[in-house]
Image: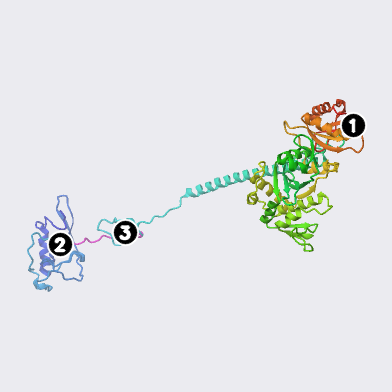
Amino acid sequence: MNDRQYDPYAGSDPYAGEYAGEYAAGYGAGYAADQYQVVGYDEYGQPVYQLVQQQQQPQVPQQYQGYGYDPYAGGGQQQAYDAQGAAPTPYDTAWVPQQQQPQPSPPPRPEPEPEPAPEPEPRREDEQPGYEQPGHKQPEYKTEQFSFIEEPDEDSEDVIDWLKFTESRTERREEAKRRGRSRVVALVVVLALVIAGGVGYLWFAGKLPGQSDGTGGAADATGPQKRDVIVVHLHDTKGGGTSTALLVNNATTGQGATVLLPNSLAVSDDEGSATTLGKSVDDDGSTGTRESIDTVLGTEVEGTWRLDTPFLNNLVELVGTIDVDTDADVPDPKAKKGEAPLVKKGEQQTLSGQMAVAYATYRAPGEDESAQLARFGQVMRGILRKLSSDPQGATTTVESLAQILDPSLKEKDLGTFLAKLAERAKGGDYKTTLLPVRSDGTLSEKAGDTVVKEVLGGAVKAPEQGAALRVGVQNASGSKGAAQDARVSLVNGGYAFVDAGTGAAARPTSQITYADEADKAQATEVAKTLGLPTSVVRKGRTAPNADVSVILGQDYTAG
């Protein structure tokens, strides 16, 4: 039971009545019990009292079931009030009317006199002021009273320093690796430049293996190069006639070129008979003409582009006119006499599609064919300068022409090829040249040294596996029919005949030369086919467009 509410020994305490009586005599019975307070119990269970010094404090009147006391007043004091709520006088303390209660609650015990306490410790921030109980000073803590402070750890600095050291070391290693790779790349680049420079010097000096200094009789060569070649035939649908040119893209040297081929160029037809380029275009078609050109020039034409004049007109309009340095006034076929020409002579003349067609096909009376071919070449170069260098853009232009191309050449292939040439023409790495031929249509010495060797690379192109050996025949026998007889014999023997023209003077003996050692056996077979002794075969210089060269002397007789 709670000793504050009920004291079982209150009535049997021998001292309680004595002191209570003395106190009540002077101050009244209502204050007698307030002098002592139970502070504990002895070994027999008897209460132990202690005298409490009463302090006068202001009283707040309160009526509480007949007892007048304030449970929160200091010192456990109580005050009785009468029924009207008036404070009692000293003469009324003998008897105070009380209401009957089943079990009145005893008054609270007065607080014991506090003992001298040691110097108070500084209160921490997490303690609530005023929260103490007698004999029990442990405060009640709440979660919100705590503030967590991260105290520095002595080892944390060491860990951070170690991490920094590890990270720095890793970065240094990675940086060292990067520098090492950079040095290797730089070294490789330097070595490549040195090698390229050395090879370039040897090539320029003619000291590379396979190159000839010109004294050994072998054909001069610049080394194997990657060339893409297509042939374009311009057909004049109104005036008649054709104009032929080779478009060349040298991927090795980064050069582009237009090689103009005269219609008088001597070629062989499908049966091996002598004919001209102009007749071959009309009679043999694109495939036969392409093979004839390969035989004569030692090239490998990849495709044929037939460009009729209406499509040339559309092509110029699609690229948006062209600028050409014209060399002649071109009259308008529809204009009356005395009217201004359709195309005026002058520099940077802007030509529309109609004007470009008129200029490309114009040939003045008595003018050589080469003049008209040169104008055609100017128009083609002007078109390339205005054509897109993007393969897709150039292909779109070709597709917009809506022309039917030769099966050997697709629209995409032609567009990609023209885009490369357009890039060369815009950068100034483009030239136009005329293939020089003799009056009989055969190639001149100049043609072999400049155009065929340098531009077309015919001198260094070996025939494909299974392809016919090209045999160039020059007639120096003094007999006009000797060349035709040799043609028939060689074609029947499976060789490709290349007409090398007529010699300046007759020779008493024939001569057969080969440039490549691999062609020695073939050259011997050529001698047998022509009925010549094998003693006339020797290694030497050949025509740029032939694998084996034959000079027919007076000792040659038709077999």
User: At label 2, which amino acid type do we have?
Assistant: Pro
Q: Secondary structure at mark 1?
A: loop
Check whether the beta carbons of the residues at disc 3 and disc 1 lie within 8 A of each other. no
Q: Which residue is mark 1?
A: 553
Q: Secondary structure at mark 2?
A: loop
Viewer-proximal residue among 378 and 82: 378
Name the quadrant of the C terminus.
top right
| Relative height, residue 526 to residue 291 (above, below) | above
User: At label 1, which amino acid type do we have?
Assistant: Gly
Q: Which residue is mark 3?
A: 118
User: At label 3, which amino acid type do we have?
Assistant: Pro
Q: Position of residue 406 (x, y in %)?
A: 67, 43
Q: Earlier in the sequence, mark 3 or mark 1?
A: 3
Q: Which residues are magenta?
A: 110-124
Residue 119 is covered by the magenta coloring: yes
Gap between marks 3 and 1 measured at Cα: 145 Å
Q: Secondary structure at mark 3?
A: loop
Q: Which residue is mark 2?
A: 107
Viewer-proximal residue among 183 and 146: 183
Check whether the beta carbons of the residues at disc 1 and disc 2 lie within 8 A of each other. no
**Residue that appears at 27% across and 59% down:** 132
